[in-house]
Amino acid sequence: MRAFEALGETIASISEDGKRWRYPVAASGIAGVLLAISGFNTDMRPVDYSPNLNLGIAALLVLIALLIRLTVIYYPIKAFYYHKKGIPFEELTLIKESITGGILALLVGIVYGIVILIVGGLMLFPAILAYYALSGTTRYVIAGLLGLPPAIFLMGTITMMIPAYIWTKDFGEGLGIIGTALDNAKEVFVFGALMGAVIVGIGAAAGGLVFMTSLVARGFIETLLAGLIDGLITGLSNVISGVAGAAMYRKLRVWAEKERPVEVNPDWLASL
């Protein structure tokens, strides 16, 4: 099944060369620390810390952290692209490329997000309708049964959209993933379930680490450690989801090329 193959390819690619994941994980950890210092609580759990910083400095730290996280989105996908194309690359050069690449990916992602909201709203409409039409415990059960499968499918689709854009530098390619995903609904559903399980598992492990940190540290130190752990885990999740999305996109693209009708050159026919 292509979903398992994509995840296996992701693990193999990451484990082969540290250049493909080293920067995104480390940079995301730094971004997590900057956000913690600025007063933004970790995603894992709130910490007891109130920064005594000038508002301008706090805002600057947040902007730097967000810029770093944009590069973390772009870097692992492009590194995987260079790996598959057999193109050597230097980490510093790719980091510089990831600054503009990450900003463009954000802008493209906003448009993709609007489209997904529309498509997702249509797919989840039965679940939404059931939630408001029914009452009691029944509405939660029915809404869950109706909403979970399309939600998992959408997760698999979303995971491939930005990688498809970065891989091809084609805005339409990311949108085209929606149609390809619908044609391979079973594969994309399994892929979405796998990615959900991996990300939730990593997040749960990180939450445990943050909790253990809170037992031995307090205040500013706890905030720094929680921000660092949160950042490192976010970076690792971005690497796995980005590379897996690119790998799954490549496999579906091969399928689409095989299914595409062969165009016969009329001049060639005339020469027969």
Image (spheres, grey):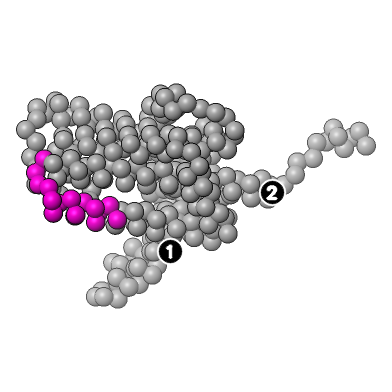
Out of 105 and 216, give the one closest to the viewer: 216
Decide: few, some or many residues near mark 1? Use Cα within 10 Å; few <14, some 14-19, many ≥20: some
Q: Nearer the viewer, residue 135 or 222?
A: 222
Tell me the tag on residue 258.
2
Is residue 123 visible in the rendered structure shown here?
no
Q: Which residues are magenta?
A: 205-220
Query: In the image shown, does 252 or 16 lie closer to the viewer?
Result: 16
Q: Quadrant of residue 232?
A: top left
At 87% from the left and 37% from the top, the residue drawn is 269
Residue occupying the far right of the picture: 272
Q: Residue 40 vs residue 19: left or right?
A: left
From the image, give the main secondary structure of the stretch colored magenta. helix
User: Residues at badges 2 and 1 in contact (C-beta under 8 Å)?
Assistant: no
Question: Element under label 2?
Answer: helix
Of the residues under marks 2 and 1, which one precedes in the sequence?
A: 1
Report which quarter residue 66 is drawn in: top left
How many residues crowd around disc 2 within 10 Å: few (fewer than 14), some, or many (20 or more)? few
Residue 211 coordinates in the image, percent (x, y) = 19, 55
Q: CA distance from mark 2 to mark 1?
A: 28 Å
Along the line of sight, which residue is nearer the eye, 262 or 228?
Answer: 228
The amino acid type of the residue labelled 1 equals: Pro
Q: Position of residue 133 (x, y in %)?
A: 30, 70
**Residue highlighted by disc 1:** 149
Decide whether residue 217 is among the magenta residues. yes
Q: Is residue 37 visible?
A: yes
Residue at (64%, 50%) from the top-left corner? 255
Q: Amino acid at mark 2?
A: Lys
